[in-house]
């Protein structure tokens, strides 16, 4: 919900773009963005369904989480080598979409940041900074909805529902604040700064898991 509210204008433009494309029989840039989101969701969904048990088994290995955080940090740090200029949605291709979708699927591994690896994948593919961030978070909407459907049966009942609702409300407002903060960092090209956080936490986890 935080993503939907924060990117409500972009979602509105996507809906309008789809309508214009159907009416004018020409793919509007916003409709193209929707098509790439749908395409990127396919590899994520397949990986989530086919490799779900293997991914979940990794949660029992704290050291794996630490190592994956170090890897996430390394990818984030490497973004400082990427040029400022990038391709806009008009020049984004289906290959970009598929590779970012695969990156999102890999992020099911604990310790791999979903937003971090998908934004990094977009930047490495030569996409514009803002487009990389926007695409990453819009792509999270079907992924989160899909995961919610798969895990819905595990939601508790009774008192646990009230606690879950409180957690959802807090997460919503923290999410809104975080999205605004993170998008500013992405646009400024300083996302590599998160690498130091990932390295520090990853090293600490590995040390404690010895």
Image (tube, rainbow, N blue to C red):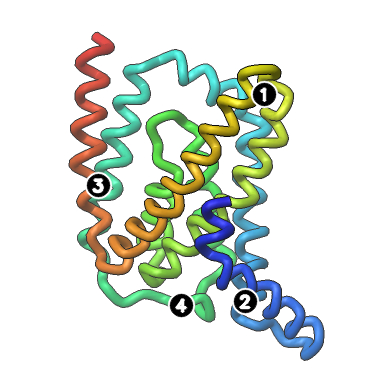
In the picture of the structure, the residue carrying the numbered disc 4 is 88
The numbered dot on residue 13 is 2
Q: Nearer the viewer, mark 2 or mark 1?
A: 1
What SS does tag 3 mark?
A: helix
The numbered dot on residue 67 is none
Instruction: Give the image location of residue 192, x and y in percent.
Output: 23, 53
Instruction: Give the image location of residue 199, x and y in percent.
Output: 21, 35
Q: Residue at x 25, y 47 (%)?
A: 194
- Given the current orientation, which residue lies at the most extreme right position? 23
- Do labels 1 and 4 touch, CB within 8 Å? no
Residue at mark 3 to residue at mark 4: CA–CA distance: 25 Å
Classify mark 1: residues with Cα within 10 Å, few (<14), some (14-19) or many (20+).
Answer: few
> In the displayed structure, would residue 126 be above or below residue 206?
below
Classify mark 4: residues with Cα within 10 Å, few (<14), some (14-19) or many (20+).
Answer: some
What SS does tag 4 mark?
A: loop
Residue at mark 1 to residue at mark 4: CA–CA distance: 40 Å
Residue at mark 2 to residue at mark 4: CA–CA distance: 16 Å
- Do labels 3 and 4 touch, CB within 8 Å? no
What SS does tag 2 mark?
A: helix
Q: Nearer the viewer, mark 3 or mark 2?
A: 2
Q: Give the quarter of the figure containing the C terminus.
A: top left
What SS does tag 1 mark?
A: loop
Among the 4 quarters of the image, the one containing residue 200 = top left
Name the foreground residue: 76 vs 20.
20
Q: Residue at x 31, y 64 (%)?
A: 184
Instruction: Decide which of tag 3 and tag 1 comes sooner along the chain.
Output: 1
Instruction: Decide which of tag 1 and tag 4 comes sooner along the chain.
Output: 4
The numbered dot on residue 194 is 3
Instruction: Decide which of tag 2 and tag 1 comes sooner along the chain.
Output: 2
In the picture of the structure, the residue carrying the numbered disc 1 is 155
């Amino acid at each position: 919900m935080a993503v939907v509210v924060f990117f409500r204008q972009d979602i509105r433009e996507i809906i309008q773009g789809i309508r214009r494309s159907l009416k004018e029989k020409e793919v509007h840039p916003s409709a193209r963005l929707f098509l790439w989101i749908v395409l990127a969701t396919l590899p994520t969904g397949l990986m989530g369904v086919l490799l779900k048990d293997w991914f979940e088994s990794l949660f029992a290995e704290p050291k794996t989480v630490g190592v994956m955080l170090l890897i996430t940090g390394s990818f984030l740090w490497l973004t400082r080598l990427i040029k400022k200029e990038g391709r806009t949605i008009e020049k984004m291709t289906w290959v970009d979409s598929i590779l970012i979708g695969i990156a999102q699927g890999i992020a099911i591994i604990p310790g791999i940041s979903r937003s971090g690896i998908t934004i990094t994948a977009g930047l490495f593919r030569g996409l514009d900074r803002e487009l990389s961030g926007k695409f990453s978070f819009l792509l999270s909407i079907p992924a989160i909805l899909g995961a919610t459907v798969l895990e819905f049966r595990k939601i508790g009942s009774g008192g646990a529902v009230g606690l879950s609702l409180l957690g959802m409300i807090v997460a919503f407002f923290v999410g809104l604040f975080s999205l605004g903060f993170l998008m500013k960092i992405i646009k400024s090209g300083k996302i590599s700064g998160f690498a130091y956080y990932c390295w520090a936490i990853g090293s600490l986890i590995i040390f404690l898991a010895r």
